[in-house]
Image (cartoon, helix red, strand yellow):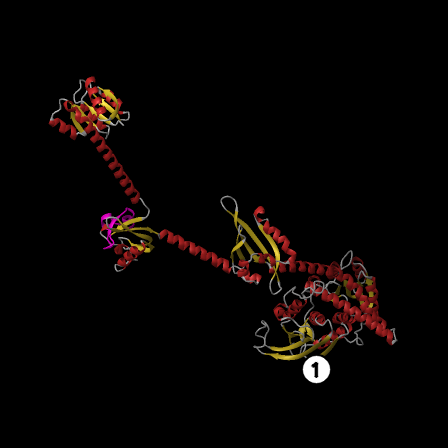
Amino acid sequence: MPIPLRVVLVEDNPADAEMIIRELRRADYDPSWVRVETEPEFLAALSAETDIILSDYELPKFSGLTALNIYNECGYSIPFILVSGTIGEDLAVTVIKLGAYDYVLKDRITRLGPSVANALAEYRMRRERRKSQEGLTLFRSLIDQSSDTLEIIDPATGRYMDVNGKGPAELGCTRAEYLSLHIYDVDTAVRKADWPLLVSRLREVGFVSGEGCHRRKDGSTFPTEFSAKLVKLDREYVVTVSRDVTMRKRSDEALRASEERFRELAETIHEVFWMMDARRHTMLYVSPGYERIWGRKIEGLYADPATWLASIHPDDRERVGKAALAIEATGSYEEEFRILRPDGSERWIRDRAFPVKDSAGHVMRIVGVAEDITKSRELQEHFLRAQRMEAIGTLAGGIAHDLNNILSPVLMAPLLLKDSVSSEHDLQLLDLIEQGARRGSNILKQLLTFSRGTGGERISVQMRHLLKEMVSLVRETFPRNITAKIQVESDLKPVNGDPTQLHQVVMNLCVNARDAMPDGGQLAISAKNEVLGAADVAEHAPAKPGEYVVISVKDTGTGIAPEIMGRVFEPFFTTKPPSKGTGLGLSTVLGIVRSHGGFVTVSSSASVGTTFRIFLPAAATGSKESMPPDAHALPRGHGELILVVDDEESILISMRTLLERHGYAVLTESEGSDAFATFTENRGLVRLVLTDVMMPGMGGLNLIRALRAYDPKLKIIASSGLTDQANHDNLKAAGVDAIIDKPCAPQVVLETLRRLVGASL
């Protein structure tokens, strides 16, 4: 089958052109040809695809040499054959040197077929060689541009035979310098003695990889990773690929450092950091805080994440479970709930979680932080309780005036009636009335002391009397299945303190003892003197060595569990039901005792009982002891005129009766402005004014100020049902000479009058 051939024929003679085409056909070619005679025609013909150019040497308007020069200038490489009848040998050599493939004389036209075949074959060979060379050049360029170092090493000597551009660039040397080196000169991880072993290993397995360390020309080094392969061509070669992993090492180190910082943070914070696979519902990470707060092993949570939900208090479980399932829809999760620890204790948890999404917006992981908020919840509860206590204090202060006004005449009446009653039974009833009024007054003072911290002045107190009174009260009010006994040293020393507060201390301990003996038992109260050394008070700073009065309150009740022994004095901590206690009793005891310079100890055993010991500093020798007033030796007046001012008629009546029976003349008024008018009318006669503070109209404080401005030497006693320190401070600032808290015993009123009126004589 004829071979297609596209020909550009530079020929001015049509007959010669036909001859040439005929010869090509005879040589088994199928030519498609264009005949040109001028340079423009030649240039136009070359723009088309051409397989070969056949050119006459001499044309009227053109020449073969000109065509050859144009061919060379245009950079063509297709075969160019000169076909002429007049060319000489020298010219033929010149034409060949200029780039022609061959020349054929027209009188030997039969050579044209073989010449064309040879030219086309050589053209194809050159083109393939050029393509191969271009490919090798491109391949070499790609190798040189590689980010890895590619090396060919002589397996016998370990010397580099070839290397791409990356290797010399990394070492800071030339390619020639690189090729003068051996692998053990460059890689510090490969010793000269190791190279034969490495080659032997390559012969066994064909491929090895590992880590190395390359040394630069300046002596510095950098870490590498390498792989080596044994290649067999005409001989054996070791081909290696290595790369500088400095940045990756730094990145890995930074990642490890970051992970270490994260782990340090996650493992040292008090909160629990956790991470969960949202798709597989498996735990990815849980910080050690879980074991501290939940009291459970982390391994159990990894094995079964459902144990988290099972640990939640049943009352909170459903709510929290729904919130956790809705996190993908809501985008966040924050819940507060209770958990049950294996030891049965409860803790409050605040758990916050957030979804982590992939690029498609799907939730991959859920991360969260859970913290123990038990203490803050307790503080919140304590704050609410404190608010309630403040409200109680406000209420107590508001009703104190009215209650004290009610109790004042009740407390005075028995003394006034005893002189006119001869029946022993009636006298006992009067004593009961007086005791009831005193108890009501003491209860009110305790309520004010507890709610507002109000307390009286420190005086010398003989605890023997207080404890005997307390035992009597216990025997009267406690259940009959509780027996009370008392043992007090005969030479018990007094203490300096507030009798009301000390009474409250003993009362709180007795009440706790009663509650610890629901089925009955024994309550023993004792007091003794004791000398303590530095070692005895070392754990009770700021207590100091010295003489103490030690009061013990011992019961035979249920005792205190060891795990809560350290918390019994915490405010609001109680094991009693909400309706049975506030958790303030023992904290109040501790606060009062410490304010007196003492300390408290407690010992307890299950089913044996509990003993509280109160250590109070003994008063200095010679301190005047406060003794109960002698009702049969009440001081009397000598006709002095006393102005009594109070808006309560019952108080005016009882006070007038008391004072008149004990030798005083009395004027009474129920309003401040009237009292001031009465005083001015009787100026020089009124020796003392005894006035209430809380009155309508012109109050007691304004009356005191007006009286003091009118007569600076006048003796004034303020009688108030408000016992707080602020009220006392205001009265003292106004210039009163004495303050009597309502309700008060008649003896106190008479003694205060005698002291002030007698002092003015």
Q: Residue furthest bottom?
A: 490
Q: Is residue 162 magenta?
A: yes
Residue at position x 81%, y 69% from top? Answer: 412
Quarter of the N terminus within the rendering: top left
Q: Say what amino acid the circle numbered 1 marks.
A: Ser
Task: State the count of labels.
Answer: 1
Quadrant of the rendered image containing residue 488: bottom right
Instruction: Identify whether 757 is placed above or below 338.
Output: below
- Image check: 210 left or right of 603? left
Percent coordinates x, y for residue 615 in the rendering: 64, 75
Residue nearer the viewer, 229 or 462: 229
Q: Crowding at label 1, few (<14), some or many (≥20) Cα neighbours within 10 Å?
A: few
Instruction: Identify whether 247 is placed above or below 559.
Output: above
Percent coordinates x, y for residue 319 in the rendering: 63, 53
Residue nearer the viewer, 269 or 42: 42
Query: Can residue 584 be seen at all in this image of the molecule?
Result: yes
Residue numbers of the magenta segment: 154-178
Quadrant of the rendered image containing residue 56: top left
